[in-house]
């Protein structure tokens, strides 16, 4: 009975994992519930691995079930774990390399709730970015206003920039969205507005580096928009109180809406990437994990800077779960990826991504 119970449990988890292997091919615009499977995938992989060791002790033949299922789902596992030798990031950049910084800056609010600290964090965030000596900076949740012009924090070293200005309050000169800063000239730029005007858009800048033109995309895809009340609801669910069902339904509804919108946005992004006439790179906050339709469709045959250089799972969001790698740097195959780092400066709920790249050959 003991073995039978665990074998049935093993079968159930194996079937759920096999369904999760279909996630990359099912657009969450229509198949929104598959978004939940993407979030579960890392835990399903861990459970299947535990079953392999469990059966090797009690019934070795049964371990084949999990092993075969994991082999079938190798594509999901390949984007979840990076298997490179762990190397120290070298701060001194090579002459022919481009250094790119990508960061969801959290509106320059920092992580403190104290007003004076937030004002100090605004300057500190700019300083830690500039310390990396990047050539290109891509920021999401960037904002500035007449009273607090954050563009000026970078403009001296980065005279070229393109700002999406997705949200505006003309009375105070307030503007917010995604922005691309560059040391090199920007000869063209553009913006793809997502339907609904509820989030930041997809933007790009064509940057001339010596004799070559490259296109840099950045975006901030639809988030779950969890509020403080939602996090309190999560605590309610953990305590399994009577209100937990209502709390779960409320959270699930928000997640469904986000999965659906990201499905629409993903198609727009992929079409824009396909239309690029230059060697291209996209970075930003996708608000989705590697085991998702969003990631697989946007990345397609492109490279992932984390997977190419790092070791482990690589969480980029400092909340909810240790498996949330939702920020990415994805160059196309025209680039070499030399090194990559994820930096926690305690100034945002996202980690700062730093990547050194170069073109494989001049145009």
Image: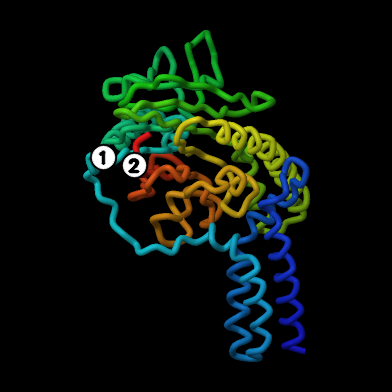
Question: Residue 206, how many percent across, how many down?
Answer: 43, 26
Residue 294 shown left or right of residue 158 in the figure: right
Which quarter of the rendered picture does the N terminus lie within? bottom right
Mark seen at residue 115: none
Which residue lies at the image location 52% right of the left edge and 27% below the top edge?
A: 203
**Residue 267 percent location from the top left of the image:** 66, 37
Q: At 68% across and 26% down in the image, what residue appears?
A: 195
- Say few, some or many: other residues with alpha carbon within 10 Å of mark 2 (under 14 / 14 to 19 / 20 or more): some
Residue linked to disc 1 = 96
> Foreground residue, 110 or 276?
276
- Report if the CB atoms under discs 2 and 1 are less than 8 Å apart: yes
Q: Is residue 153 visible?
A: no
Q: Quadrant of the C terminus?
A: top left
Q: Residue at x 70, y 51 (%)?
A: 25
Which one is earlier in the sequence, the residue at label 2 or at label 1?
1
Identify the image's colour scheme: rainbow, by chain, secondary structure or one colour.
rainbow
Distance in Å between CA atoms under marks 2 and 1: 7 Å
Of 214 and 225, the residue lying toward us: 214
Q: Position of residue 132 (x, y in %)?
A: 28, 39
SS class, disc 1: loop
Quadrant of residue 262 in the image? top right
Query: Is residue 285 among the parts visible in the rendering?
Result: yes
List the residue tagged with mark 2.
358
Q: Examine the rendered structure and indicate whether residue 245 appears above or below residue 97.
A: below
Q: Secondary structure at mark 2?
A: strand
């Amino acid at each position: 009975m003991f073995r039978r119970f665990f074998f049935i449990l093993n079968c159930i988890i194996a079937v759920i994992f096999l369904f999760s292997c279909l996630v990359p091919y099912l657009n969450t615009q229509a198949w929104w519930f598959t978004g939940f499977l993407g979030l579960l995938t890392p835990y399903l992989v861990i459970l299947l691995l535990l079953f392999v060791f469990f059966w090797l002790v009690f019934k070795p033949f049964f371990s084949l079930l999990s092993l075969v299922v994991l082999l079938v789902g190798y594509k999901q596992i390949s984007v979840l774990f990076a298997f490179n030798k762990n190397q120290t990031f070298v701060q001194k950049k090579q002459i022919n390399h481009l250094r790119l910084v990508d960061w969801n800056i959290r509106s320059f609010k920092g992580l403190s709730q104290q007003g004076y600290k937030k004002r100090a964090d605004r300057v500190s965030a700019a300083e830690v970015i500039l310390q990396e000596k990047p050539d290109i900076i891509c920021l999401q949740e960037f904002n500035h206003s007449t009273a607090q012009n954050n563009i000026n924090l970078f403009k001296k070293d980065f005279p070229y920039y393109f700002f999406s200005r997705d949200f505006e309050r003309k009375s105070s000169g307030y503007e917010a969205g995604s922005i691309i800063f560059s040391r090199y000239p920007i000869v063209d730029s553009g913006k793809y507005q997502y339907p609904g005007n509820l989030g930041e858009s997809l933007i790009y800048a064509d940057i001339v580096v010596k004799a070559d033109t490259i296109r840099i995309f950045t975006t901030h895809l639809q988030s779950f928009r969890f509020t403080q009340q939602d996090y309190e609801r999560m605590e309610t669910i953990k305590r399994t109180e009577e209100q937990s069902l209502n709390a779960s339904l409320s959270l699930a509804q928000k997640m469904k809406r986000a999965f659906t919108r990201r499905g629409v946005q993903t198609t727009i992004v992929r079409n824009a990437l396909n239309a690029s006439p230059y060697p291209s790179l996209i970075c930003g906050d996708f608000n989705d994990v590697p085991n998702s339709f969003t990631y697989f469709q946007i990345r397609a045959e492109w490279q992932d800077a984390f997977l190419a250089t790092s070791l482990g799972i690589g969480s980029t969001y400092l909340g909810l779960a240790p498996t949330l790698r939702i920020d990415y740097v994805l160059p196309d195959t025209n680039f070499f990826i030399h090194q990559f780092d994820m930096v926690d400066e305690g100034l945002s709920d996202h980690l700062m991504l730093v990547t050194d790249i170069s073109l494989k050959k001049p145009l």
